[in-house]
Image: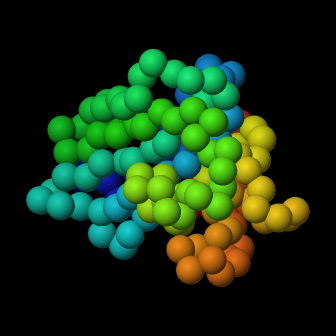
Amino acid sequence: MHLLPDSMIQLAKEAAVQRADSNRDIVAAYLIGSLLDKDPFLGGSADIDLVFVHAQDTKARRELLSLTPEIHLDIKHNSRREYVRPRELRIHPWLGPEMYDPLLLVRERALFQIRPGWPAGQISRSGEHHPARPPQRRTCPPDV
């Protein structure tokens, strides 16, 4: 079974909304990784990289869930406290690249604010301001 990237993004949105609805500790979820590029497939397989941000620390840091033999969800769990110093995120070895250009899927509250009106996802590596993708709240967004 070979899914198109748009279908995979829709799967990611549905998975994020479903998980956030069943776990009130999740304050945000976003999509990162190769799926946001034009061709996420390598050797006929692909992963869907999701990040769930929890209000509290969580025991699970990583989860892998197989959707098909070729596609799996790679879920990373972060604590909201990892986002308390937004200016330092750009130089953080893991969160910096992760926060560069994510697709926000679920947001209950802003993770942080650089300046009033600048929510997460608007600051690039160079510090330039970029419009954020509109957040989706606890409902499955329309097809991409």
Is residue 17 at all visible to an observer of this figure?
no
Would residue 57 appear left or right of 34 to someone viewing this image?
Answer: right
Q: Which image quadrant for residue 56?
A: top right
Locate residue 43, reporting x and y percent: 12, 59
- In the image, residue 89 sits, relative to residue 140, either above or below, namely below
* Image quarter in which the C terminus is found: bottom right
Is residue 23 at all visible to an observer of this figure?
yes
Residue at screen point 34% across, 61% down: 34
Residue at screen point 41% across, 29% down: 61
Residue closest to the eye, 72 or 57: 57
Would residue 98 appear left or right of 81 to someone viewing this image?
Answer: left
Residue closest to the eye, 65 or 11: 65
Locate residue 68, reporting x and y percent: 25, 37
Locate residue 95, reporting x and y percent: 48, 52
Would residue 80 appear left or right of 69 to someone viewing this image?
Answer: right
Q: How many marks?
A: 0
- In the image, residue 102 sits, relative to residue 65, either above or below, namely below
Taking the view exactly as shown, the residue that stands out farthest to the left is 43
Residue at screen point 29% across, 40% down: 72
Locate residue 112, reporting x and y percent: 73, 50
Would residue 12 appear left or right of 142 to someone viewing this image?
Answer: left
- In the image, residue 32 sits, relative to residue 127, either above or below, namely above
Taking the view exactly as shown, the residue that stands out farthest to the right is 116
Residue at screen point 68% across, 22% down: 24
